[in-house]
Image: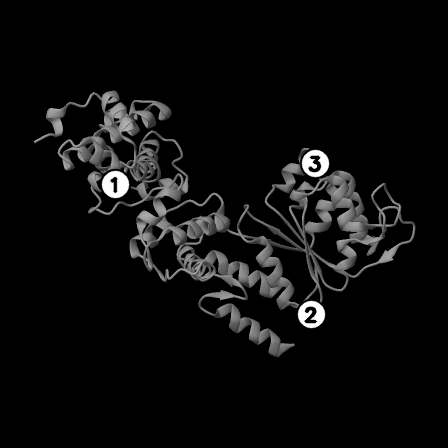
């Protein structure tokens, strides 16, 4: 036993991860320690909480594989994907003839996992009546199949997971108080969101890059340093699941062996993106120009303006402005909005967010078109090809913005 404990400690102390989990940040190191200290050497039930996409199933698998039941079954049920009738049959099984379609006896997953571990994901989605039956199993270690009259003894370890606030669900009457106390009396592990894990983001992205490159027979082998910085500045509302989507699309789009910033731009959402100084407006097509605007300059500028106006000053996005003088922050906004998008800071702050967003987008498109037309010396077909729009669309946009030939023809 002591030898196993020492081996686990060595693994927890390794540089890049624990089991299949990956990361070196203090936030994820705490999770490793919790798994190692509270779950590995016992069979207590576990509650895993955290935002959607943080890797709760991976943690559950790690707990199972490192624990004393590693050679026994590991079974998963996701309550968010099943209706109440299906969940009951899936969890507890049913006897032949228990209901119209019950042509044969079926073992429930609690029974299938006997001796091993059952991971019940999104337990907050269970109906109150199913919660009561589950509580009875936890208390008595016996279950009744649907339509059955004979109790069946089970020795199953339960790992529960949810992204819901269970105390709030309790207050709303959507979750049974007795079941809540029963599952929360065991081990509780909380997973940090990806945005709080720092350089772990790059480690995970590099692993995903290798995985997707191999699966899709691509030769993409590395992340450009600026791409890494872009990844580190995203907020990832979908957490690791969102990073997977982002890396898959980037790998599929990458023409070479390196993920460049432009491979990410179309797939980023709602987070600041640093711009390479060499990428002038004339070097962008309209689609990427808009992606750059919405995913880079605009959110950054409005985080700054909202900080000045006192909105969201406690949010993580405002941290980069904390402690700076208003003059310094205004200079940053001026760099983003005025110098790049030709919109004054004063005007932007004075507008409602939706109105300002539309105005800035309009100004950006107008100046991008001018830059493109100057570059092509007014040749409409060439400009349309560069912007990846048809001739009719380009002429329509030029008219919309009131562009005149003398502005861009030498």
Q: Earlier in the sequence, mark 1 or mark 2?
A: 2
Provide residue 235's location: percent of width, then percent of height: 42, 44
Residue highlighted by disc 3: 174
The answer to whether residue 265 is left or right of residue 94 is left
Against 114, residue 381 (above or below) is: above
Provide residue 398's location: percent of width, then percent of height: 23, 25
**Depth order, front residue of 160/270:** 270
Q: Residues within 10 Å of mark 1 (few under 14, many from 20)?
A: some
Residue lying at the far bottom of the rendered structure: 3
The answer to whether residue 271 is left or right of residue 394 is right
Residue highlighted by disc 1: 284
**Residue located at (51% from left, 51% from top):** 192
Q: Residue 71, which numbered label?
A: 2
Against 343, residue 154 (above or below) is: below
Q: Earlier in the sequence, mark 3 or mark 1?
A: 3
**Residue located at (31% from left, 57% from top):** 224
Q: Residue 376, which numbered label?
A: none
The answer to whether residue 174 is left or right of residue 104 is left
């Amino acid at each position: 036993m002591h030898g196993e404990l020492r081996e686990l400690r060595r693994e927890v102390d390794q540089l890049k991860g624990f089991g299949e989990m990956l990361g070196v940040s203090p936030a994820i190191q705490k999770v490793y320690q919790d798994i190692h200290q509270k779950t590995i050497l016992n069979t207590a039930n576990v509650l895993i909480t955290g935002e959607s996409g943080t890797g709760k199933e991976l943690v559950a698998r790690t707990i199972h594989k490192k624990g004393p039941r590693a050679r026994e079954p590991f079974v998963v049920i996701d309550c968010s994907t099943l209706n109440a009738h299906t969940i009951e049959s899936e969890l507890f099984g049913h006897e032949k003839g228990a209901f119209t379609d019950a042509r044969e006896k079926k073992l429930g997953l609690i029974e299938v996992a006997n001796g091993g571990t059952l991971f019940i994901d999104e337990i907050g989605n269970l109906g109150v009546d199913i919660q009561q039956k589950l509580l009875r199993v936890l208390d008595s270690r016996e279950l009744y199949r649907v339509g059955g009259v004979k109790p069946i003894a089970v020795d199953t370890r339960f790992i529960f997971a949810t992204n819901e606030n269970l105390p709030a669900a309790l207050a709303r009457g959507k979750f049974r108080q007795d079941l809540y106390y029963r599952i929360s009396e065991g081990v509780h592990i909380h997973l940090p969101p990806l945005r709080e894990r720092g350089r772990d983001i790059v480690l995970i992205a590099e692993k995903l890059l290798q995985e997707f490159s191999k699966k899709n027979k691509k030769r993409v082998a590395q992340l450009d340093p600026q791409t890494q910085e872009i990844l580190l500045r995203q907020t990832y509302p979908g957490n690791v699941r969102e990073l997977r989507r982002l890396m898959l699309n980037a790998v599929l789009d990458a023409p070479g062996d390196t993920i460049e910033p432009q491979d990410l731009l179309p797939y980023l959402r709602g987070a600041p993106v640093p711009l390479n100084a060499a990428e002038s407006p004339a070097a962008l097509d309209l689609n990427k120009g808009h992606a750059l605007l919405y995913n880079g300059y605009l959110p950054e500028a409005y985080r700054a303006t909202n900080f000045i106006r006192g909105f969201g000053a406690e949010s993580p996005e405002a941290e980069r402005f904390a402690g700076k003088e208003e003059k310094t922050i205004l200079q940053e906004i001026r760099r983003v909005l005025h110098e790049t998008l030709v919109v004054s800071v004063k005007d932007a702050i004075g507008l409602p967010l939706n109105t300002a967003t539309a105005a800035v987008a309009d100004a950006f498109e107008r100046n991008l078109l001018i830059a493109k037309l100057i570059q092509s010396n007014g040749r409409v077909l060439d400009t349309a090809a560069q912007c990846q729009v048809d001739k009719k669309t380009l002429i329509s946009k030029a008219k919309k913005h009131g562009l005149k030939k003398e502005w861009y023809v030498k």
